[in-house]
Image (cartoon, rainbow, N blue to C red):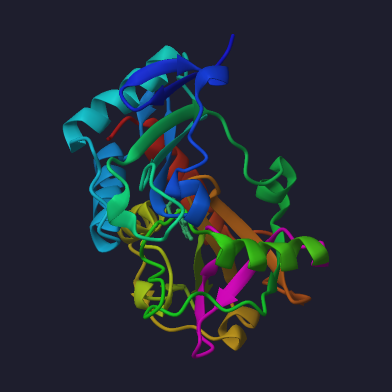
Amino acid sequence: MANKIWLDGQLVDEDKAKISVFDHGLLYGDGVFEGIRVYKGKVFKLAEHLNRLYESAKVIRLEISATIAELTKATLETVKANGIDDAGYIRLVVTRGIGDLGLNPFLCKQSTIFIIAASIQLYPEEFYENGMKVISGSTLRNHPMSLPPQIKSLNYLNNILAKIEAIDAGAGEVIMYNHQGFVAEASGDNVFIVKGGKIYTPPVQAGSLEGITRATVFDLARAEGFEVIEKNLTRMDLYIADEFFLTGTAAEVIGVVDIDSRIIGDGTPGPITKMLKKKFYEYACSGTK
Ligand SMILES: *Cc1c(COP(=O)(O)O)cnc(C)c1O
């Protein structure tokens, strides 16, 4: 059965879901997006995702040609039309729309919106069991005064260049640093470490996206009595961490056991990482939003 794609107000078959070659999303990576999970038939944190989408759009002065209520309805319709009930992944994309060959975004009359509901597995199952090897990338995360990393933008080349370094090195992920040498994030995930029983993560101002999984992990860890501290982290902090994990909608919670050939802990995902991974999954499946 062909996938049903929501495109500008209608559900269409996958092979009919076509975008103009003059769409600025394609010509310039001009647009914003969200990746959202479906657990046990419930769309996880949809309101939070849509809120972030509109904030990203505001910053790049993109007017989304639908209301939050309309996009909520459209997302739920797309999930239903594709019979997705568990382990689903939604990609909601808003581009600047069709314009001419110049950069001027305001010549684009109306944003293009599409929603894909499918499934995703970001990393092989083995990585979740045994932990992942990562490297420090030489590609710096975008400077916040050029393209703020807090925008979930379609312009992903910065992250792609870093990801290529990981692929070339045979590593599962890449850690990106900012222009000051502090940890920003992974190519599409947020970074956490555990040291002395406390949980640390860089502040978003260090150059990361304000992850919804990250915020959920804050809540879950604090509910278990752990302190979660937002603090700038260096490469050294990562090397000497007791535990190391990444969070993201697609990744969920995944342990890191090797960075630049420095083994983390005993070389397997640590107890706090495993506990948070389990709590996250339980919470996500519980239908509490
Ligand atoms: C989406 C994304 C994340 C993770 O955010 P979630 O809301 O947890 O999915 C982290 N970094 C980047 C660059 C992202 O695009």
Tell me: 243 left or right of 192. Answer: right
Q: Which residues are magenta?
A: 169-188
- Is there any visible trace of residue 103 in the rendered image? yes
Vertical arrangement, residue 269 with respect to residue 193, above or below: above
The residue sitting at 70% across, 50% down in the picture is 127
Q: Position of residue 213 (x, y in %)?
A: 40, 52
Q: Is residue 172 magenta?
A: yes
- Is there any visible trace of residue 223 in the rendered image? no
Quadrant housing residue 149 = bottom left
The residue sitting at 25% across, 30% down in the picture is 72
Q: Position of residue 261 (x, y in %)?
A: 78, 76
- The image quadrant where one finds ligand 1 is bottom left
Query: Could you tell me which quadrant the C terminus lies in?
Result: top left
The residue sitting at 30% across, 25% down in the picture is 74
Q: Which residue of the protein is positioned furthest toward the bottom in this rendering?
A: 180
Query: Could you tell me which quadrant the N terminus lies in?
Result: top right
Vertical arrangement, residue 205 with respect to residue 35, above or below: below
Tell me: 277 left or right of 213. Answer: right
